[in-house]
Amino acid sequence: MTPSCVAGASGYPASLRPENTAPSRVGAIWRTITGAFRCVGCTSDDAVLPGNQRYSASPPTDLKDRDVKGISSNPLDLPGTDDHAKAFKEVVRRIKTDQQSLIMEKVNAITKDHLKQIVQCCRKPEQITDEHLSFFKTDTFAYAALRAFREKKISGNEFATLVTLQGVYLEGIRNIKSFEIVHHKLFDGNRNANEANWGIIALSLERSKWFFNGSSFDVSSIIEKMKRLLEKAPPVEASFWSCTYPDSSDKDKGLRTMYKVLSNRSFNVLLVDWWWTGWVICPSITLRQAFIDSFCQEEAHKINPVIGASSLEDIRTGGLKGFRDMAIPFPGHPLPKTADHIVAQWILEFMQHDFYHAVRASMLKNADIHLIIAIADVVRKIKASFNNEYYRVTRLFQQREEEFEHSISNQLQKQRGRMKNDWQKSEEVVSIKNTLEYLKRTRKALGQFAFNLEDLDTHKPTWDISSYNYDKERCREHLSNILLQLNSGSGKPWSELLSETDAGIVGQCIIPMISGNLSNPLELYNHFCRKIDSEISSGSKKHLSKEEKQKYLARSKKLIEPLNPSVKLDQSQWPIFLRETMKNGVHIPGSGLV
């Protein structure tokens, strides 16, 4: 990905277009609210914002240049700060320190013969499940691969491919009757393309065309580009495996799994081996990357294989810098069994979920990613205000409780119990508890909304926004995505959604960031009102109750009110704590932004 300004779009003039300058009627509120989060159209140099404020999203960098936090005391750390040390630390830094110590003991026990076998597996991957099978089935194989990577005998991608293959194999033989796995070379010994095996890859792309509908998705062209990228790759990376996938048991047939969800979306890229019924593809990491690079080209995100759980900050940083974490299995670190609240029973299911997100992010322009994350930052800023107020009210309640306990300390125990019970039912206490519950719910809803945005699972790609009436079309695409994420999880027990009032507050903060100098914002407002009405009447929302549908409508229309010139935007209706916080600014932990 190439560095890009926050609001400008690659390929279109932006330096003279104040596309995110707030309309005059909301300008004063917007300048008060957003501070350093404001965005304007600009060239690759930061443009000066009103009030001499600047917003600069971190530009994409190579993995070796990423900031690696908390690495100085980790047992697995490599000495030095060269590119290889940084890349190795990035893979292992999510492992807890005590677990790193145990892994280091295993790594130190690896012999030269183990390392020799690992190198041989990378050179002749067809031998892994044959001549090296006894070694391959042991945890020692994974520790040896990690040490080989640490000592630069193999690359990071080779390491990730080996441990993924081992995880898939061990999972298969333990859980699938008559498990089979077959290796496929993409090139012969003379580096000529093996067209039969490329045909398997091509068919998985053909069966994914619907997912990429609206984008230029030429399978033949993508395959040719992938060939050029992989023709000099190490043998283990210029190959893939096919393996049997378990049939759904009777008890699992109604289960909503990641495999089913992605298949229903026609995202079958490097997933299903359509030549053999019931078989799936286990691709190398470099093969996955070759697809993203060939299809997305300069906007392509880099797959970042990691051991352990990624944090919210990892996801946000990766979005800004052009990386997407992909969790890989490792002894003692199995992959989660759910992703995005969807069951992911098998390793390849979970990894396909991460691959899906890498592709999704790569289908956005850099400037649009920066804008989406800037919007998420503002939502997190609001969440921080609610969080601070929650703890302030909690401390107040604790203080009042202590004062009351002290006031009745001289009473008999039975009388104290009755007095305490009456106090708990008093109007003041009930009011405080209701306030705490409201703050807690809203804090959670804001956090979920911000993460939904940072996850970059957008409404649709921003590649194809027409240069004709660009500001209007870009605003339309971003607002569609914002509304999608605002209501994501509607009707689900794990989801917390904003109230109509709080959605209105958020709308006043973020709509000016995308509305720009629209000549007719009311036209867009009316368009989305009709769209919201249509969505709530569609079959896709039939699972919602009548009350949930009413809240969906109210929440959505309140958020987009800043587009309606006839509506007076009044910050005085906000909670006092929020007005003060947004006026003075609040630091978002880990973001470096205020």
Image (spheres, rainbow, N blue to C red):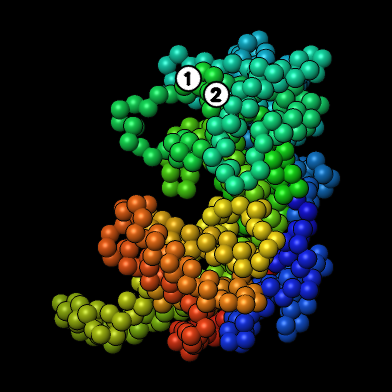
Instruction: Give left or right: position of 247 versus 582.
Output: left
Q: Is residue 552 above or below residue 331?
A: below
User: Which residue is depicted at the point 44% across and 74% down?
Assistant: 558
Q: Is residue 12 above or below residue 230?
A: below
User: Which residue is depicted at the point 23% across and 84% down?
Assistant: 426
Residue toward you, 183 or 390: 183
In the picture as drawn, the residue positioned furthest to the top comes out as: 131
| Residue 33 falls in image quadrant | bottom right
Question: Residue 292's spot in the image, x, y percent?
Answer: 68, 40
Q: Residues within 10 Å of mark 2 (few under 14, many from 20)?
A: many
Mark identifier at residue 273: 2
| Residue 372 falls in image quadrant | bottom right
User: Which residue is depicted at the point 70% across and 44% down?
Assistant: 296
Query: Can I make out residue 7 in this image?
Result: yes
Instruction: Determine which residue is flagged by label 1.
Output: 277
Q: Secondary structure at mark 1?
A: loop
Residue toward you, 109 or 5: 5
Q: Residues within 10 Å of mark 1 (few under 14, many from 20)?
A: few
Figure quadrant of the C terminus: bottom right
Q: Amino acid at mark 1?
A: Thr
Residue toward you, 438 or 518: 518
Question: Residue 531's spot in the image, x, y percent?
Answer: 44, 63
Q: Secondary structure at mark 2?
A: strand
Q: Is residue 49 above or below residue 490?
A: below
Instruction: Give left or right: position of 571 versus 434.
Output: right
